[in-house]
Image (cartoon, helix red, strand yellow):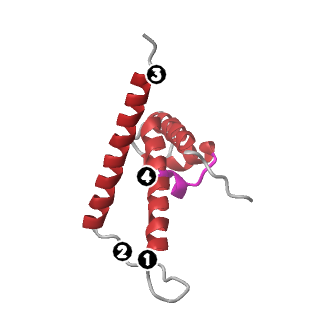
Amino acid sequence: MPRRVFKPEQIINKLREAEVLLSQGVTVGESSRKLGVTEQTYYRWRREYGGMRVDQAKRLQELEKENTRLKRLVADITAPTPSGTPLTPVTPTSTWIHLREAVILLFIGISLLIALLWVKRPG
């Protein structure tokens, strides 16, 4: 039987249904069967998503994706190059220097744009 993947919104809704069933006196086993999941899945979902709202679950999923992306970036940076030597990591000082230069260039570009718009302004 293929494994079904539930979205966080669906999981939270199923946990709410389970809470209603449990408050009516139904056992955890019976309520999980009515939801179509195992008891182990129910407990795992409750540990992971218990007390969470749908918007919080969506934000959690976004953060997990971002974290995965950042981990890949770090792995790419620290991976050895074809010559066998790892790339040198960027130091905080060099990062600040590049950031400062980028901000200065941005302000210069904005200033030039404003000056051009001001000159071409009718009237």
Mark nearer the viewer, 1 or 3: 3
**Relative to 5, residue 106 above or below:** above
Q: From the image, which quarter does the N terminus lie in?
A: bottom right
Q: Which residue is mark 1?
A: 78
| Badge 2 vs badge 4, beta-carbon distance below 8 Å | no
Q: Which residue is mark 3?
A: 120
Of the residues shown, which amino acid type is indicated by label 2? Pro
Please report the bounds of the magenta region as a residue range: 36-47
Disc 2 secondary structure class: loop
Depth check: give the residue in front, 94 or 66: 94
Of the residues shown, which amino acid type is indicated by label 3? Lys
Q: Position of residue 81 (x, y in %)?
A: 51, 82
Mark nearer the N terminus (1 vs 3): 1
In the image, residue 41 lies in the stretch drawn in magenta: yes
Query: Which image quadrant for residue 41?
Result: bottom right
Q: Is residue 92 left or right of residue 121?
A: left
Disc 1 secondary structure class: helix
Mark nearer the N terminus (2 vs 4): 4
Q: Which residue is mark 4?
A: 48
Q: Which residue is mark 2?
A: 89
> Overall secondary structure of the magenta stretch?
helix
Q: Residues within 10 Å of mark 1 (few under 14, many from 20)?
A: some
In the image, residue 83 lies in the stretch drawn in magenta: no
Mark nearer the viewer, 3 or 2: 3
